[in-house]
């Protein structure tokens, strides 16, 4: 059921964004808090987030802390636990939260994909702890490959769903290989097409494939059941998080998971028009998919991890031609629906800062990894919320004094006028607990507004 206002289609983007933020502000009304203090803290944190999203001054600079795999390590668990025994991983996180959440001003639960489901389906696109990586590896890794060949651009452009089902998915999921035996489903017209459909159904490998899907379904049920009892606990403890959806830059979709880095870089020279046409198709699909996500109806933001647009991946001319236009088209479509665009600029975006602005105030938020924050504040700080970039290396290897010094400098550089969140540039693996505490000390000493 759509709970948005009846006149949603006639509301301006600003009105829609204001409604979403107010919905978020009132989100605590349906939360069963563990105490009056938790309820008060929840409201304080919500108001802080809304203020910085609107590029205004809250009472204090908001803080975003990620302990990474620290809760698992402190519980004596390997990182594979999050993928294969999520209930144990969540219980370890809860013990960590019970001991440190108040002191760290943060509540953390592990990001959990089902290793068993990915094993059953024969997922090839990633490796993870216990699934191609050592049990205690820091996190998942992408397996670079050519999952779409150069001569398949026309297939993708002509019929994306058919290409996905009969060519792409069989390459990234071993269990999907029998789909290569199917005819294009658009060939099935009236009775003669029934035979074309039924022929692969009679193949034993196809029968086995559907049995595998059922097995994966049972495994996913089990995985989900292990996590469900922990859902909503963070809110009940007073920790607010603006919900929403996620998205990828169209160029990253093609370059990360289909053509591969080397091949898409060559495509910019060898077949630029095919690449541009495919990017438009991917953009249309992306916009449609995101707007149909469960979180996009009442959520606040859309999160993007940006990869190949970073400094050094391509020239500015290539960025302007191949990367930014379709990413901006996605952003514009979601801004029109009142959704804040939250872009995680992995690596450095120093050379891009003068090219990625111009959006309505409060409609875009940036999390910077290694970008010069003084330059980011100057270029974008009047119209966008910015966050980052406490180095992960500092949190893992340095001292509390050095962390505190870094945080103070960031606050003094970025907090003026509001719209800044103190945050790591990326989620660190196994940070030092005392260094996370130093971030809290810094924001409480230097982050209050007068």
Image (cartoon, rainbow, N blue to C red):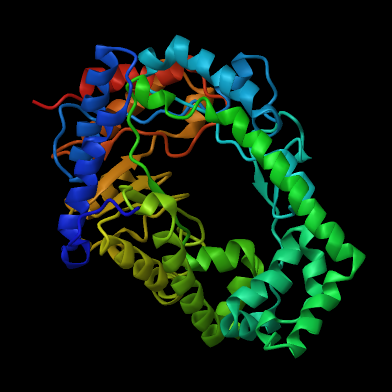
Q: Is residue 344 visible?
A: no
Name of the residue lying farthest toward the top: 99
Residue 20 in the image, given as x and y percentages of width and height:
24, 48
Residue 247 falls in image quadrant: bottom left
**Nearer to the camera, 70 or 117:** 117
Residue 191 falls in image quadrant: bottom right
**Nearer to the camera, 443 or 157:** 157
Name of the residue lying farthest toward the front: 191
- Does residue 88 lie above or below 219 as drawn? above
Q: Is residue 367 left or right of residue 17?
A: right
Residue ID at (51%, 68%)? 251
- Does residue 164 lie above or below 175 as drawn? below
Residue 391 in the image, given as x and y percentages of width and height:
45, 34
Residue 420 in the image, given as x and y percentages of width and height:
25, 38
Residue ID at (29%, 30%)? 30
Residue 220 falls in image quadrant: top right
Residue ID at (50%, 56%)? 307
**Nearer to the camera, 332 or 202:** 202
- Does residue 60 lie above or below 326 as drawn? above
Name of the residue lying farthest toward the left: 450
Count of all numbered marks drawn on residues in the image: 0
Name of the residue lying farthest toward the right: 204
Residue ID at (49%, 61%)? 312
Residue 195 in the image, given as x and y percentages of width and height:
81, 83
- Does residue 204 lie above or below 63 as drawn? below
Q: Is residue 376 left or right of residue 317?
A: left
Q: Is residue 159 visible?
A: yes
Q: Is residue 155 left or right of residue 110?
A: right
Q: Which quadrant does the C terminus fall into?
A: top left
């Amino acid at each position: 059921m759509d709970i948005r206002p009846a006149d949603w289609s006639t509301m301006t983007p600003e009105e829609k964004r204001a409604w979403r933020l107010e919905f978020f502000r009132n989100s605590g009304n349906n939360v069963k808090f563990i105490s009056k203090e938790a309820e008060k803290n929840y409201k304080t944190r919500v108001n802080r987030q809304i203020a910085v999203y609107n590029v205004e001054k809250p009472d204090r600079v908001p803080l975003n802390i990620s302990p990474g795999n620290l809760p698992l390590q402190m519980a004596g668990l390997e990182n594979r636990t999050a993928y294969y025994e999520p209930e144990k991983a969540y219980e370890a996180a809860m013990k960590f939260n019970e001991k440190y959440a108040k002191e760290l001003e943060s509540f953390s639960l592990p990001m959990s994909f089902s290793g068993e489901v990915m094993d059953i389906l024969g997922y090839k696109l990633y490796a993870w702890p216990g699934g191609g990586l050592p049990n205690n590896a820091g996190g998942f890794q992408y397996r670079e490959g050519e999952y779409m060949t150069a001569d398949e651009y026309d297939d993708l452009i002509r019929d994306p769903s058919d290409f996905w089902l009969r060519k792409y998915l069989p390459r990234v999921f071993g269990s999907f290989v029998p789909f290569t035996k199917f005819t294009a489903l658009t060939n099935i017209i009236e009775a003669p097409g029934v035979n074309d459909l039924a022929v692969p159904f009679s193949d034993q490998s196809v029968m086995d494939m559907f049995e595998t899907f059922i097995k994966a379904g049972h495994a996913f049920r089990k995985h989900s059941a292990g996590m469900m009892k922990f859902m909503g606990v963070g809110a009940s403890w007073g920790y607010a998080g603006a919900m929403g959806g996620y998205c990828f830059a169209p160029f990253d979709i093609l370059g990360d998971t289909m053509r591969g880095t080397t091949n898409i870089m060559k495509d910019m020279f060898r077949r630029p028009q095919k690449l541009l046409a495919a990017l438009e198709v991917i953009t249309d699909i992306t916009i449609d998919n995101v707007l149909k996500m469960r979180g996009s109806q009442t959520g606040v933001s859309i999160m993007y991890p940006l990869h190949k647009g970073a400094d050094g991946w391509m020239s500015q001319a290539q960025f302007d031609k191949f990367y930014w236009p379709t990413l901006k088209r996605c952003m514009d479509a979601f801004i029109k629906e009142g959704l804040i665009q939250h872009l995680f600029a992995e690596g450095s975006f120093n050379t891009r800062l003068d090219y990625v602005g111009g959006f309505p105030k409060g409609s875009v938020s940036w999390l910077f990894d290694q970008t010069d924050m003084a330059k980011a504040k100057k270029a974008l700080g009047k119209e966008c919320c910015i966050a980052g970039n406490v180095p992960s290396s500092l949190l893992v290897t340095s001292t509390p004094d050095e962390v505190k010094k870094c945080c103070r400098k960031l606050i003094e550089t970025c907090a003026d006028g509001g719209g800044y969140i103190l945050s790591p540039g990326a989620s660190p693996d196994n940070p030092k607990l005392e260094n996370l505490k130093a971030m809290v000390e810094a924001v409480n000493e230097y982050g209050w507004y007068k």
